[in-house]
């Protein structure tokens, strides 16, 4: 996977061919807690061509150099450095879960270099069930399995369920807890209406970690946002229903640039 140096640290990413091309809209995707850029493999494959698509490995995830961060703001600053290091000026930034918190933070604090926001399995506040945080901090396998189970819908295939569990299990120790701590402390409920960017909100109808009402809360407050509820999908909607997800994002992106 290609790499770039951001503030002296190696950041790796997944990208389609000619991803950095000033003539195309750049789409940068940010994974959720304990994930990595490969969580967006279907999007990099399906949306590249008309768009320049890049999926970052956050610090300490996938091939990116540790340590991981433990706050949304710290991650957001790394993502901003990554965009600068690639020389991109206007970006459609899409994030899932923890990634959605990073996109919201940047949409509020650094809108200058953003063309639009994608909030996927998101929420303007992301409190984490204390039982997850405590169990994962103790290294409980039950908590890991339970959390992985909640990340997809009950109807997800065994392969998808297995892949999600394996991904979380293989994250470096402490990374998932650090990410969930960042989520737990994230709260822009009172500020979300200040986002003034084209905003595409996507949520799985069976999302058990960030229920549909969290997305509705954002869509009711962000002027001109568009919300899509995807059937037969849970929190990781881009993995469970990749074709429908890509269709929604591509349409939004085309409308945004026209
Ligand atoms: N958007 C809109 N409303 C929200 C919200 C959000 N992002 N986060 C919380 N709220 C609402 C809740 O719906 C609730 O409203 P209600 O009283 O009308 O039902 C109210 O704010 C208080 O919620 P909260 O502060 O979360 O406290 P709680 O005691 O109801 O629940 C948890 C705490 C952790 C049990 C709950 O947040 C939860 O189940 N979270 C999902 C599981 C999880 O761990 N997700 C991981 C996210 S990465």
Image: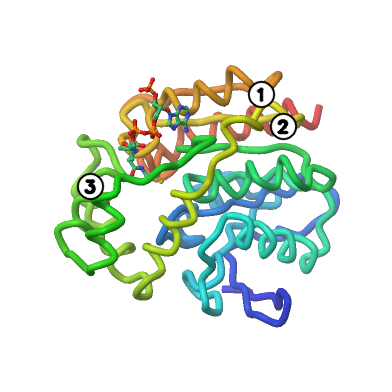
Secondary structure beneath dot 2 equals loop
Of mark 1 and mark 2, the one earlier in the sequence is 2
Image quadrant in which the C terminus is located? top right
Q: Nearer the viewer, residue 42 or 10?
A: 10
Of circles 1 and 3, the one toward us is 1
Q: Which of 181/167 is in front?
A: 181
Determine whether label 1 and label 2 are within 8 Å by CB: yes
User: Which one is in front, 115 or 220?
Assistant: 220
* The residue at label 2 has a CB less than 8 Å from ligand 1: no
Question: Mark 1 — residue?
Answer: 222
Identify residue for label 3. 149
Sooner in the amino-acid sequence: mark 1 or mark 3: 3
Seen in the picture, residue 21 relative to 126 is either above or below; the reply is: below
Give the structural element (helix, strand or loop) at label 3.
Answer: helix
Residue 246 x, y percent position in the rendering: 53, 37
- Is residue 12 found left or right of 42 in the rendered image? right
- Would the CB of label 3 be found within 8 Å of ligand 1? no
The picture quadrant where one finds residue 209 is top left
Judge depth for marks 2 and 3 and give the one in front: 2
Q: In the displayed structure, does residue 69 sit left or right of residue 169?
A: right
Expressed as whole percent of the image width and height from the top left, the position of residue 202 reads 50, 31
Which residue appears at 83% of the width and 63% of the height? Answer: 87
Give the structural element (helix, strand or loop) at label 1. Answer: loop
Q: Which residue is mark 2?
A: 195
Q: Residue 130 vs residue 124: left or right? A: left
């Amino acid at each position: 996977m290609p790499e770039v140096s951001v503030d002296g640290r190696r950041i790796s990413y997944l990208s389609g061919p000619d991803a950095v091309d000033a003539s195309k809209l750049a789409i940068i995707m940010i994974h959720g807690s304990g994930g990595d850029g490969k969580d967006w493999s279907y999007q990099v494959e399906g949306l590249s061509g008309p768009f320049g698509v890049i999926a970052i490995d956050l610090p300490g995830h996938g091939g990116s150099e540790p340590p991981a961060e433990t706050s949304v703001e710290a991650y957001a600053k790394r993502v901003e450095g990554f965009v600068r290091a690639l020389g991109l000026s206007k970006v459609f930034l899409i994030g899932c879960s923890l990634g959605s918190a990073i996109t919201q933070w940047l949409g509020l604090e650094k809108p200058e270099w953003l063309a639009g926001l994608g909030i996927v399995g998101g929420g303007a506040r992301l409190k984490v069930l204390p039982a997850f945080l405590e169990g994962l901090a103790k290294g409980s396998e039950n908590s890991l399995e339970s959390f992985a189970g909640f990340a997809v819908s009950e109807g997800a295939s065994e392969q998808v369920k297995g892949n999600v569990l394996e991904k979380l299990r293989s994250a470096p120790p402490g990374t998932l807890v650090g990410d969930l701590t960042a989520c737990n402390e994230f709260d822009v409920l009172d500020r979300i209406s200040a986002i003034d960017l084209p905003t595409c909100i996507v949520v799985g109808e069976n999302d058990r970690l960030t229920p549909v009402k969290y997305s509705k809360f954002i869509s009711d407050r962000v002027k001109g946002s568009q919300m899509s509820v995807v059937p037969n999908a849970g929190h990781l909607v881009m993995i469970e229903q990749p074709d429908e997800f890509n269709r929604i994002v591509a349409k939004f992106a085309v409308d945004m640039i026209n």
